[in-house]
């Protein structure tokens, strides 16, 4: 009997890479630190965006459009 | 790209970065970041006072007005504009672009010292992107197959990480890519990140381990996504 061939070999590809030691799980302290750094920058960005959004809304509410 | 566009890219200054923390890191590592959106493009205007389809820049929208007929109109500026997006796009452009910059500078596989990158960010549907990916020269083939198989939301923010030299080629190329979920407003703990690849780092989420993985395989440069509106400065 002919064995069915898998259509998608991606899982095998990643398993082989893991066996070859080419996969690093990003859960080490330095990776967590990097995640926290990105988080704090994004928090700063979110606040800056909220401020700009609010200012834009305030200035837009003062505009009178005339035809 | 034509000569005019080459000139626009060459004369591009480093992009403005809001975060002081990122600025300090960039300065200390001597990283230069250029943004495709900083190129001064001309847009098509439909203005009630003029025939339709006039080309102008957003900085000077009334530049082509007859100064004798319309006095002082050529100095007009845009104060407000509305840019409607599909209702389910919750990740704002500003945040998506900031995330990519922060990820490239402070993330798990940061840009090396003295590197120069040119970022090109756009919003597209995952179907359009996958449709393009099928015919693209993206390699290795297994990674391409993985991306095609990967479940994605309806809309994604894509950032291509390339260089000024590669983007100016007849067949523009990119060295890396960051795919973000445009329907995910939460960027904390890389929640919006779907996939990232740059040079020898491919970062993807592993369902088995419930965390991100960095795969060290070389990523050859590949063609940029071409299904966007073309622009010219003619």
Image (tube, coloured by chain):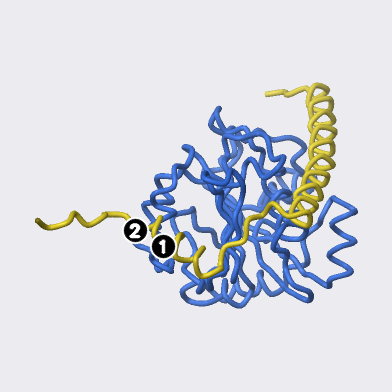
Q: Badge 1: how crowded within 10 Å, few (<14), some, or many (20+)?
A: some
Number of numbered markers: 2
The chain coloured yellow in the image: A
**Residue assigned mark 1:** A13
Q: Is residue B211 left or right of residue A31?
A: left
Relative to B190, say whether B11 is above or below: below
Chain ID of residue with mark 2:
A
Q: Secondary structure at mark 1?
A: helix
Residue at (52%, 77%) from the top-left corner? B169
Q: Position of residue B109 (x, y in %)?
A: 69, 63
Q: Badge 2: how crowded within 10 Å, few (<14), some, or many (20+)?
A: few
Q: Position of residue B228 (x, y in %)?
A: 48, 53
Asked whether the viewer can see residue B54, the reply is no
What whole-number distance in Å separates the C-alpha atoms at marks 1 and 2? 6 Å
Question: In the depicted view, which residue is nearer to us: A51 or B151?
Answer: B151
Residue A52 picture quarter: top right
Q: Residue furthest front?
A: A1
Q: Colour of chain B?
A: blue
Q: Are marks 1 and 2 on the same chain?
A: yes
Residue B35 picture quarter: bottom right
* Image disc number at residue A9: 2
Marks 1 and 2 close (CB-CB < 8 Å): yes
Question: In the depicted view, which residue is nearer to us: A6 or B22?
Answer: A6
**Quarter of the figure with the C terminus of chain B:** bottom right
Q: Position of residue B142 (x, y in %)?
A: 40, 63
Q: Is residue B209 left or right of residue A51?
A: left
* Image disc number at residue B227: none
Relative to B2, say whether B62 is above or below: above
């Amino acid at each position: 009997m002919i064995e069915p061939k898998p259509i998608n070999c991606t899982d095998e590809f990643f398993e082989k890479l893991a066996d070859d030691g080419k996969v690093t799980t990003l859960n080490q302290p330095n990776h967590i630190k990097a995640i926290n750094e990105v988080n704090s920058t994004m928090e700063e960005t979110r606040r800056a965006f909220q401020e700009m959004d609010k200012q834009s809304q305030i200035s837009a509410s003062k505009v009178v459009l005339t035809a | 790209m034509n000569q005019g566009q080459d000139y626009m890219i060459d004369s591009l200054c480093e992009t403005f970065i809001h975060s002081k923390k990122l600025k300090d890191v960039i300065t200390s590592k001597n990283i230069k970041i250029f943004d495709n959106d900083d190129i001064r493009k001309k847009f098509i205007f439909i203005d009630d006072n003029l025939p339709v389809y006039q080309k102008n820049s957003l900085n000077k929208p009334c530049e082509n007005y007859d100064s004798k007929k319309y006095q002082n109109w050529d100095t007009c500026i845009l104060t407000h504009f509305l840019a409607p997006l599909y209702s389910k796009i919750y990740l704002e452009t500003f945040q998506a672009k900031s995330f990519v910059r922060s990820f490239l500078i402070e993330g798990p596989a940061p840009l090396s010292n003295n590197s120069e990158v040119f970022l090109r960010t756009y919003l597209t549907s995952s179907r359009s992107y996958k449709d393009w990916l099928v015919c693209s020269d993206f390699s290795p083939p297994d990674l391409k197959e993985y991306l095609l198989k990967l479940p994605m939301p309806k809309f994604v923010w894509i950032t291509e990480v390339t260089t000024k030299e590669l983007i100016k080629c007849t067949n523009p190329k990119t060295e890396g890519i960051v795919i973000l979920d445009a329907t995910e407003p939460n960027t904390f703990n890389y929640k919006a990140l779907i996939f990232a690849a740059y040079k020898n780092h491919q970062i993807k989420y592993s369902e088995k381990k419930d965390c991100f993985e960095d795969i060290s395989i070389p990523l050859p440069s590949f063609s940029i996504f071409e299904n966007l509106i073309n622009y010219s400065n003619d």
